[in-house]
Image (tube, rainbow, N blue to C red):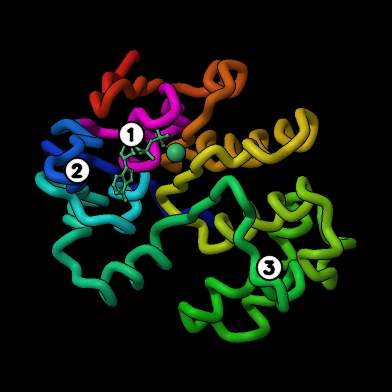
Amino acid sequence: MSTPGLLLQTEQLSRIYPSGDGSITALHPFTHTFAPGLTAVVGPSGSGKSTLLNLLAGFDTPSGGAVRVGGTDIHTLGEAGRADFRLKHYGFVFQSHNLVAILSAQENVEFPLMLSGVPPRERRERARALLSDVGLEKRAHHLPSHLSGGEAQRVAVARALVSDPAVLLADEPTGNLDTRSGQVVLELLTRPARAGKTVVLITHDPDVAALADHHLRVRDGEVHAED
Ligand SMILES: Nc1ncnc2c1ncn2[C@@H]1O[C@H](COP(=O)(O)OP(=O)(O)O)[C@@H](O)[C@H]1O
Ligand SMILES: [Mg+2]
């Protein structure tokens, strides 16, 4: 029960930040169609990787150009429309898990479904299934503070995937994890890619990049597709 992918595209997408008297071009105009599967984004610190991801997510507003998801220019939607669109079509995983501290693992995974108005029973079942997929059914009622870093990040992955999003964006999701936990989280992120979803993963780790189907290299705000 998986919705078909929606094509993620950028067209002359750019971002300029004001800086002192002048400005920094954090992203030079970038036109790209993200093929379904796993795209790794690599590049040195400060090169513009997070800037690109935040624009793809609609968290930040471009200085020029567009981001299209299934043909919809997300920046024409308005704030509320964009939030709704994100809830339906996107999943996010960040370097830190960003779980809600006062909610259990299960409630954290249910949270996006609650916001989309999924009835309680269905959202409980879906959250349980996802927690089981990430191997955490026994931790369902634990608070984030009672989980290891690796477990908390697996809950964050379950939360990102519970709405079966077409687009999954991850910004250094294994950056705070030990090698073994990082591998588990990565394995979980490659699954939707295999199922035809578009997964965009920022990483410093060459081993991680080696797992990807497609590669983008960012340098001084210029993005180049390597394959
Ligand atoms: N909100 C901001 N305001 C001003 N400059 C920013 C902002 N965010 C990022 N930058 C600048 O844009 C460039 C790219 O940053 P970033 O996308 O975070 O790089 P990366 O994720 O590759 O480490 C850097 O020079 C950074 O200082
Ligand atoms: Mg970054």
- Looking at the image, is 73 positioned above or below residue 200? below
Along the viewing direction, whichever of 61 and 131 lies nearer the viewer: 61
Q: Is residue 34 magenta?
A: yes
The quarter of the rendering in which ligand 1 is drawn is top left
* Three-letter amino acid code of the residue under disc 3: Ala
Along the viewing direction, whichever of 176 and 75 lies nearer the viewer: 176
User: Disc 3 vs disc 2: which is toward the camera?
Assistant: 2
- Looking at the image, is 42 positioned above or below residue 12? above
Span of residues in magenta: 32-52
The x and y percentages for residue 10 are 20, 40
- Looking at the image, is 72 positioned above or below residue 167? below
Q: Secondary structure at mark 1?
A: loop
Q: Is residue 163 magenta?
A: no
The x and y percentages for residue 73 are 17, 55
**Numbered circle sitting on residue 15:** 2
Quadrant (top left, top right, bottom left, bottom right) of the C terminus: top left
- Looking at the image, is 77 positioned above or below residue 119? above
